Amino acid sequence: MIREFFYRTGRRYASKWTVLCIDLCIVSVSFILAYFIRFNLSFNFDVQRLWTQLPIVVLLFLLAFLISGSYKGVVRHTGIKDIYAIFNAVCLASIGAIAVVMANRFSGFVDEFTIPLSIIIINSLLAFLALSASRYVFKISYEAIMNRGEAPAKNMIIYGAGESGIITYNTLTNHSKMQAKVIGFIDNNRKKVGKQINGVKVYDKAILTSDFVKFNNISEIIFSIQSISPKQLRTLVNEVVDLPVKVKIVPPVEDWINGELKVSQIKRVQIEDLLDRPPIEIRNSKVMKDFDDKVIMVTGGAGSIGSELVRQICKYNYRALIVVDQAESALYDLQQELKQAGFFNFVPIVGDIRDKNKMRILFEEYRPDRIFHAAAYKHVPLMEQNPYEAVKINVAGTKTIVDLAVEYDVEKFVFVSTDKAVNPTNVMGATKRIAEMYISCRQQEGKTKFITTRFGNVLGSNGSVIPLFRKQIEKGGPLTVTHKDITRYFMTIPEASQLVLEAGAMGKGGEIFIFDMGESVKILDLAKNMIRLSGLHYPDDIDIKITGLRPGEKLYEELLANGENTLPTYHDKIMISKVREIDYSRTRTMIDELCISNLFFKDNVVQLMKSIVPEYISNNSDFCKLDQKNPRTSPKSKSEVGFPQLNN
């Protein structure tokens, strides 16, 4: 019954006028007690004078409460700011009482209105303590009654006993539906270890063992450290990732909503936070100047990279932005997202880059100055089974946009390529390399500056490994890894998009920009870390299954060239790849033949592709038989053509 009353009261919240009346009653009682304390708990004072002074004191406190607004706070969520408001009100009322006494002395009123200074001081202390204690007692009583008979839903550890950690503690404990109990703080500062914050002990990180976690039934560890580098954070997270807990992180202060931390902002640590590579910093000043008053077109604008390119470009002072994609639903979602973010200066176009007539109409109408070509088929196993479609989109589609760019004197054309174009072992990579070669051919003609960017796998993109692992974990496993030694390079979608924009700004035409992405990541280790971050154990809770390399898949991706095969740029993470010279006339003729031929037979399509790209050696594919008919040793062939090699 009592609990139900508190629940209804808590949901309605107590009226601020009710709180004000209770506060005035508390002040009245504290003033009477002040007289008893002043006169040694006896009645050796003029009681009539007390009753005469009491209305004046109550009136002064009423004015002070109204000015400070101390009665407006939600009592069950009382915090330090509410206590400050009470302190200010008490000080204001006390100053008012002293002012009344002084005015009485100088005005000659009757002596009954003169309040002794000692009474004013004692009353101030009693009133402040009583008002603060009343709120604390109500808060504790409310929590005790609401949680009676219920164990806390979650026991937590907060990693970091600084200001951010304390704010996190207050946010968690003040959240009525959270039912969270903070078992302790963890901090590396020896001066804090052993002390208490709000009654919660501060421990050294050495205490974090499986036994400690199990004994205290800890379900979550929350990292709340603001002044820490990404590398230090990765180190700390890796130290606790094997414990049977969920690992969460508090976002940076600048991301807090209106300067206040919300429980909803405390998120699970993502696998992206554990990749051992520093974030890439991109200079935006060149991009800003390059985009000023330009008409920009993005093909594949609703895809993983294309949509992020659009989001980044929207922040600049361009004249018009044309977003082209054949995926209607994805393009609609992007359109709504941009409108809700306050961006309206863009034109979404549903269209296929293979439709030359439609593309010509777009070029004629909008006359783009900059083109970012991100439209492509990218899934390796699917394209291995559908080489004809891969050629039509990745080669013929690119050829259409490139030809129109030259015809309409587009200033810059930035092509989004892939590390799989380096010494390709699959159809998808080979088509991207052929597109690069065609762009090199057209670079020799016209005014358009053609620029190519290459990078590795993008975290969180459609069809990438991390979303796949997340789905498999949700289903209870197992996680599928194609080979125990397979490695990949990773970068975030914003980094990839910024690289493309930066390359477009710095490019003079004819360059292939490659990205220093740090160390490659072992996919098996990635899978194990994702299982751990989910609060599960490998292999007890979720197993990992080795499925074997997929058709056309490499064990190691190649991205960076040796020192003699790259040229530096002003950005230490961006380099220019030096590739072999090609016979432009012969290459263009063969690419034209590939695009116009109705080669529906897979072997015929791939055979012609291998003629165009001599270093294209199939791997774990049905097309390996084509290499056996025309034997070449892969390492020797790759070395001879002067393509980038990566020492793995």
Image (tube, helix red, strand yellow):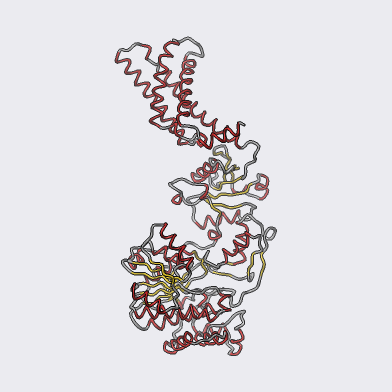
Determine whether 610 is above or below 276 in the image: below
Q: Quadrant of the N terminus?
A: top right
Determine whether 428 is above or below 320 in the image: below
Task: Give the camera-side residue of 395 and 545.
Answer: 395
Compared across the picture, whether 3 is left or right of 569 comes to: right
Residue 151: % across, % down: 65, 41
Residue 497: % across, % down: 44, 66
* Quarter of the rendering containing residue 453: bottom left
Determine whether 347 is above or below 175 in the image: below
* Quarter of the rendering containing residue 619: bottom right
Q: Residue furthest left?
A: 107
Residue 12: % across, % down: 51, 36
Task: Give the camera-side residue of 595 and 562.
Answer: 595
Residue 163: % across, % down: 49, 44
Determine whether 151 is above or below 390 in the image: above
Compared across the picture, whether 69 is left or right of 170 comes to: left
Q: Residue furthest right?
A: 540
Task: Give the camera-side residue of 16 and 442.
Answer: 16
Task: Give the camera-side residue of 493 and 330.
Answer: 330
Q: Quadrant of the C terminus?
A: bottom right
Total labels: the figure holds 0
